[in-house]
């Protein structure tokens, strides 16, 4: 019971799978071709829809009437089906490549934004490098001026006493203090600029990270970028290989499933078969076949083994029965000649009958009544 249910349900599952694959292939193909010929999108949709239906009908027709179709019609329909498969595959390729191109364009926009922010960041880095060098120079100058103030001493000899007197120079001190104030002022200004540039640099780095990560494209193109980096093949070529793999499987699989569904329903509805003699009998009817290859070999196919054995034994017994001994016609003739009390005419007639029997036996013709 369960086996019969499975046999009846499985063809419908094949048909459902065939229709789903065919419908999805037709949808992608129609969408791709309508985008390719955007100027007449509605007309292209109507045309490709009819062609998709015709393709499925052709596939079923070629299978159902494969033995009765004329050869030229069968050849034309086969070529037309193959061309329609190529058209459908081309539409699917156009649809998927268009979808990828939209994503690639968005990725290109994001890359341009990132490149612009990186240019600003690099400019800030160059300025920061210059100010850092100036800052280092000013820090060195401030240190030297402070050392100069602390060592601002002069020595001279007193004329009256002759002693060496050490003192500071007020003019030198004023000059050093002025230079030190200017250096400190410039140092403060540069420190402020350096802090501002560092803050801008941090903002640009943060903006680059946000542009690169805070979008849906990172998840869509992430695997492709990983494969591209892993294999060293450009991402466009990887997409092309993937699309070719899809289109070479998609629509041919749909046609194969349509043919498989026709085959399954044919098997489901086929309740009869032809036996060896060309007779149409039910599938569950056992049959018997005798093929005499020679006088000793018999090929027997029966469902009942005991019946086969009995028939073979009977045939063997018949074959093993010894032939009946042939009569000795010369002895009979002698007996007739030696008979007494019979006229010569009667003896002649009996001898003629014996001679006739002998002649018939020689010709392997024997009639028993």
Image: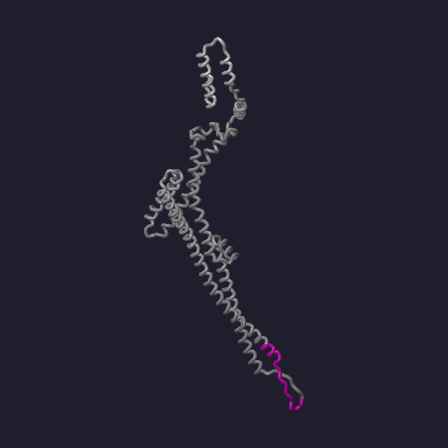
Q: What colouring method underlies this structural image? A: one colour
- Residue furthest out toward the front: 344
User: Residue 173: image x %, image y %?
Assistant: 58, 80
6 and 168: which one is in front? 6
Q: Up-down: is 164 above or below 74?
A: below
- Residue furthest out toward the bottom: 160
| Residue 146 sits inside the magenta stretch | yes
Q: Which residue is located at x 45 percent, y 14 percent?
A: 348
Please provide the residue range marked out in magenta.
144-162
Q: In this view, does 268 lie to the left or right of 135?
A: left
User: Residue 15: image x %, image y %?
Assistant: 43, 38
User: Residue 231: image x %, image y %?
Assistant: 52, 57
| Residue 131 sits inside the magenta stretch | no
Q: Quadrant of the C terminus?
A: top left
Q: Up-down: is 19 above or below 150?
A: above
Q: Which residue is located at x 42 percent, y 55 percent?
A: 101
Q: Which residue is located at x 51 percent, y 27 percent?
A: 303
- How many discs appear? 0
276 and 234: which one is in front? 276
User: Residue 125: image x %, image y %?
Assistant: 51, 67
- Say whether residue 53 is visible: no
Would you identify the image quadrant in which residue 322 lies? top right
- Say whether residue 283 is visible: yes
């Amino acid at each position: 019971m369960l086996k019969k249910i499975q046999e009846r349900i499985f063809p419908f599952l094949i048909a459902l799978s065939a229709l789903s694959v065919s419908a999805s292939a037709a949808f992608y193909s129609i969408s791709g071709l309508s985008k390719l010929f955007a100027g007449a999108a509605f007309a292209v949709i109507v045309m490709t829809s009819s062609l998709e239906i015709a393709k499925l009908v052709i596939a079923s027709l070629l299978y159902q009437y494969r033995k009765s179709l004329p050869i030229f019609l069968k050849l034309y329909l086969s070529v037309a089906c193959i061309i329609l498969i190529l058209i459908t595959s081309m539409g699917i390729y156009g649809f998927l490549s268009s979808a990828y191109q939209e994503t690639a364009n968005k990725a290109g926009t994001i890359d341009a934004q990132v490149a612009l922010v990186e240019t600003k960041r690099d400019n800030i880095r160059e300025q920061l490098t210059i100010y850092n060098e100036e800052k280092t120079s000013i820090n060195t100058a401030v240190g030297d001026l402070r050392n100069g103030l602390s060592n601002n001493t002069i020595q001279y000899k007193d004329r009256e006493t002759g002693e060496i007197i050490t003192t500071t120079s007020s003019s030198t001190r004023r000059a050093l203090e002025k230079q030190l104030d200017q250096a400190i002022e410039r140092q403060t200004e540069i420190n402020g600029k350096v802090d501002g540039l560092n803050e801008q640099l941090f903002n640009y780095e943060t903006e680059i990270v946000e542009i690169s990560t805070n979008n849906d494209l990172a998840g869509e193109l992430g695997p492709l970028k990983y494969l591209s980096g892993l294999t060293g093949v450009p991402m466009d070529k990887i997409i092309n290989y993937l699309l070719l793999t899809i289109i070479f499987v998609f629509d041919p699989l749909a046609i194969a499933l349509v043919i498989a569904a026709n085959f399954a329903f044919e098997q489901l509805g086929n309740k009869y078969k032809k036996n060896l003699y060309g007779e149409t009998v039910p599938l569950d009817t056992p049959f018997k076949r005798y093929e005499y290859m020679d006088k000793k070999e018999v090929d027997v196919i029966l469902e009942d083994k005991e019946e086969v054995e009995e028939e073979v034994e009977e045939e063997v017994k018949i074959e093993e029965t010894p032939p009946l001994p042939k009569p000795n016609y010369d002895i009979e003739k002698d007996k007739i000649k030696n008979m007494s009390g019979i006229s010569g005419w009667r003896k002649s007639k009996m001898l003629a009958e014996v001679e006739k029997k002998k002649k018939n036996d020689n010709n392997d013709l024997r009639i028993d009544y």
